């Protein structure tokens, strides 16, 4: 077995660590609508997560009392955010800053594994972080993909470091950590496990090549132990609350069989072709949605030509196998969802390797003053960083008052009724409950994109509406309904920019229960 006692090139200095964390925090603060610089995060997805998180701290159990189909750990994370601030996303902003810091730190550690980094090269991370978090598919911030690709980056780092510093297999303690991190991914959104699947396939291949099955088994049982350690408290929570069946139904059955499953026709319906066609098609759509995403992917692919030959075969094997598995699991459904590809940012730091090498070559060209070119390049990179931040789609909300947002306009109406019971009907909640300072009054509290395959949602909502259970019903502006026991109360409108950076009309109508 090869000697592993090599100098760890990826070790960071204190200045590097501080610089990377500051870069991540400043970037997230500037572009995420969760940050204190923004009035509120109006994204419907994250507001549903926040509804469940707020519910948890008030004793409600996910899936049983408040229905959603994302993983329970995501709701626990949002509960932690709600403990910090229940009426704003400040807590989630802090969590985003932590996740982005982890991403920046381990991305740079990966770069240092493969490139001879000079002190000034770290300025590249400023622009890189700015581009990653100002992509259109970042949207308003706080989604599961954003919180999870830093986790995958850590696992990728362990794999790549084992190639550079050892025999291609991670150390035993790293296998345990990877198991814990895999548990994090599994209990947030198990379609993120594609990378881990590819990573495990790579480890099995290397172990077989080395005829080291004993080492493989040592890694496997530690990995499984780590996964179990993370999973025990999650499962225990639902066991204590007699809600395992609700967990199974909402998180597993709905996502496996009901969510976003549509049929395809022609040659694309053939299983093998379908499994190739859909991931490729969705990746192309993602690049069309955000051209910078395609640029990051291209630079990452170019890194293959800048990796040392002795490291190239194993490195490419790990990257390619894990990328294919990640793609196939992320884009396993027939319906394209624009932000799914955001999870692939875990490997985009590889694109910095050719940039570091090019930057060093340019610096070496001007020997008269070795600091001149690095200084010029640093100024250019920081300027480009500023440009990427200013062009973030969320800039239309920064420093604005809450009064311009329709969520808080609606809250003024809702708060006229003490302890109001509200239903967000035919649309996903985008913050009406939180803005009004109330919790959902029923299990199926909003639309969730699964009503066609999960009719219980509309059936329950319609029954409660007929009984006059709610004080207010909020519907999208173009929704038409004539309820006998509810009357039109008013409408709310506000600015909104979608993930394509297009300003769109955002309006909702409010119905109030007829008193009689």
Image (cartoon, helix red, strand yellow):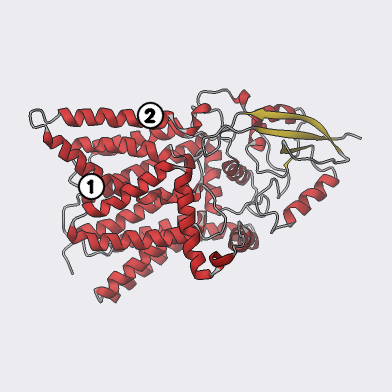
Front-lying residue, 354 or 176: 354
Residue denoted by label 1: 112
- Relative to 428, is 221 on the left or the right? left
User: Residue drawn at (71%, 26%), measured in percent from left and top?
Assistant: 412
Work out whether residue 443 can be spotted.
Answer: yes
Q: Residue furthest right?
A: 516
Work out whether residue 146 can be spotted.
Answer: no
Q: Position of residue 190 (x, y in %)?
A: 50, 59
Q: Quadrant of residue 323?
A: bottom left
Q: Position of residue 338 (x, y in %)?
A: 52, 47
Q: Residue furthest left?
A: 368
Q: Quadrant of residue 509?
A: top right
- Relative to 262, is 307 on the left or the right? left
Residue denoted by label 2: 387
Give the vertical position of 245 relative to 23 (above or below).
below
For mark 1, does the 10 Å Cα neighbourhood hold few (<14), some (14 to 19), or many (20 or more) residues?
A: many
User: Residue drawn at (22%, 65%), measured in percent from left and top?
Assistant: 167
Q: Position of residue 220 (x, y in %)?
A: 36, 69
Q: Position of residue 449 (x, y in %)?
A: 65, 51
User: Residue drawn at (28%, 49%), measured in percent from left and top?
Assistant: 110
Q: Nearer the viewer, mark 2 or mark 1?
A: 2
User: Residue drawn at (48%, 56%), measured in percent from left and top?
Assistant: 281
Q: Residue furthest front?
A: 266
């Amino acid at each position: 077995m090869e000697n592993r006692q090599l100098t760890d090139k990826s070790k960071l200095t204190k200045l590097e660590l501080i610089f990377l964390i500051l870069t991540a925090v400043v970037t997230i603060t500037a572009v995420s609508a969760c940050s204190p610089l923004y009035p509120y995060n109006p994204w419907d997805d994250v507001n549903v997560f926040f509804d469940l998180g707020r519910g948890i701290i008030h004793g409600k159990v996910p899936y049983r009392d408040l229905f959603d189909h994302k993983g329970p750990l995501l709701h626990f994370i949002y509960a932690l955010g709600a403990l910090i601030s229940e009426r704003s996303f400040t807590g989630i902003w802090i969590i985003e800053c932590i996740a982005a810091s982890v991403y920046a730190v381990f991305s740079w550690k990966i770069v240092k594994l493969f490139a001879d980094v000079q002190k000034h090269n770290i300025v590249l991370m400023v622009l890189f972080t700015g581009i990653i978090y100002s992509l259109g598919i970042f949207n308003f911030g706080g989604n599961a993909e954003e919180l999870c690709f830093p986790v995958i980056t850590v696992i990728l780092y362990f794999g790549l470091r084992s190639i550079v510093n050892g025999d291609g297999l991670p150390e035993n303690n790293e296998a345990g950590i990877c198991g814990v991190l895999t548990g994090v991914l599994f209990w947030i959104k198990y379609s993120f496990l594609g990378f881990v699947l590819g990573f495990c396939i790579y480890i099995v291949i290397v172990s077989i090549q080395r005829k080291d099955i004993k080492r493989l088994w040592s890694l496997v049982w530690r990995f499984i132990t780590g996964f179990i350690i993370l999973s025990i408290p999650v499962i225990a929570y639902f066991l204590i609350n007699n809600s395992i069946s609700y967990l199974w139904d909402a998180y597993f059955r709905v996502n496996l069989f009901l969510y976003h499953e549509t049929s395809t026709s022609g040659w694309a319906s053939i299983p093998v072709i379908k499994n190739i066609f859909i991931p490729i098609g969705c990746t192309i759509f993602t690049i069309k949605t955000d051209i910078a995403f395609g640029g990051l992917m291209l630079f990452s692919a170019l890194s293959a030509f800048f990796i040392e030959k002795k490291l190239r075969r194993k490195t490419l094997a790990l990257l390619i196998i894990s990328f294919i598995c990640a793609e196939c699991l992320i884009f396993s459904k027939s319906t394209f969802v624009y932000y799914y590809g955001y999870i692939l940012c875990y490997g985009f730091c590889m694109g910095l390797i050719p940039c570091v090498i090019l930057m060093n070559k340019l610096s070496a060209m001007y020997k008269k003053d070795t600091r001149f070119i690095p200084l010029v390049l640093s100024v250019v990179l920081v300027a480009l960083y500023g440009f990427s931040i200013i062009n973030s789609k969320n800039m239309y909300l920064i420093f604005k008052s809450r009064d311009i947002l329709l969520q808080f306009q609606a809250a003024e109406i809702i708060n006229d009724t003490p302890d109001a019971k509200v239903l967000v009907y035919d649309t996903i909640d985008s913050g009406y409950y939180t803005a009004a300072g109330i919790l959902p009054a029923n299990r199926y509290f909003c639309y969730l994109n699964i009503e066609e395959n999960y009719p219980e949602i509309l059936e329950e909502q319609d029954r409660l509406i007929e009984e006059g259970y709610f004080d207010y019903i909020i519907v999208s502006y173009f929704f038409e309904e004539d309820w006998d026991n509810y009357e039109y109360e008013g409408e709310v409108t506000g600015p909104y920019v979608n993930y394509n950076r297009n300003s769109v009309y955002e309006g909702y109508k409010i119905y109030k229960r007829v008193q009689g």
